[in-house]
Amino acid sequence: NFMLTQPHSVSESPGKTVSISCTRSSGNIANNYVQWYQRRPGSAPTTVIYEDNRRPSGVPDRFSGSIDSSSNSASLTISGLKTEDEADYFCQSYDPSNHVVFGGGTKLTVL
Amino acid sequence: QVQLQESGPGLVKPSQTLSLTCTVSGGSITSGTYYWTWIRQPAGKGLEWIGRIYTSGTTKYSPYFKSRVTISIDTSKSQFSLKLSSVTAADTAVYHCARSSGWDRPFDYWGQGSLVTVSS
């Protein structure tokens, strides 16, 4: 199996751009889709990016996703940061046995 | 609008079996190619996938829980359930049920979560 490693926390100012990385420990990041979930305190997670870089309807285009085979990682980028973006963000993918694998989560602080 | 709601005891004694039920409303549990999943989040930690069940009853479990977990579905009640045996304090977590439209599709609906504490 593999692990998805995320930074424990990131912080940035309103209006700025922040990227959160998700590094796959083994196997090619491009082999399986990566999803990103946002979890605000007290709420259930919601999908902000699916299939590496697709946005569900209703998610602002300030949110974007990408994968980089050279670093074997996925990234979630949020531009024009708003205080409402402050939340925990989790990446998620699948292993060769079709099990779901989550990253450890990143706490985004917008200050 | 599809809604998922977890229910079950909030306190379980060590070595006993944790049992939770997820009730699906606003849509049929059997319509479409949906997978019904259990996910948990221990305090201060990340999300952990426990396993999933298809409407046919086919299951897939995380290797981490495989020896202790059973997920079942009751289509007549529009519910699916989680049983986790031989629990310890490490199983204390918020347990979520969720839905996806394929095994490799994102989770599009989640329950709010149910806190289960394992303590004597």
Image: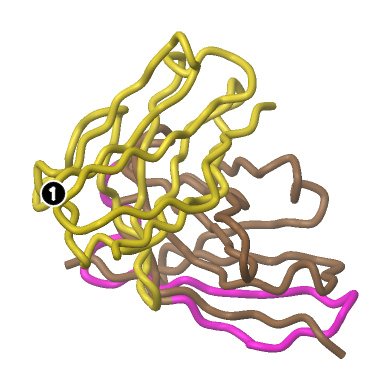
Q: Residue at x 9, y 52 (%)?
A: A58
**Magenta residues, start to end:** B6-32
Nearer to the camera, A19 or A29 = A19
- What amino acid does circle 1 point to? Gly
Per the rendering, the colour in which chain A appears is yellow
Nearer to the camera, A99 or B83 = A99
Question: With respect to residue B30, does A55 lie above or below?
Answer: above
Q: Residue at x 34, y 56 (%)?
A: A38
Q: Identify by letter the chain in brown.
A: B
Question: With respect to residue B80, does B116 lie above or below?
Answer: below
Q: Chain of mark 1?
A: A
Q: Is residue B9 magenta?
A: yes
Determine which residue is flagged by label 1. A80
- Residue B41, image x and y in percent? 58, 64
Name the quarter where the C terminus of chain A is drawn.
bottom left
| B67 to the left or right of A11 | right
Quadrant for residue A11, please give it.
bottom left
Name the quarter where the N terminus of chain A is drawn.
top right
Outermost top residue: A70
Q: Residue at x 58, y 62 (%)?
A: B40
Q: Secondary structure at mark 1?
A: loop
- Residue B62, image x and y in percent? 67, 43
- Residue B99, image x and y in percent? 37, 54
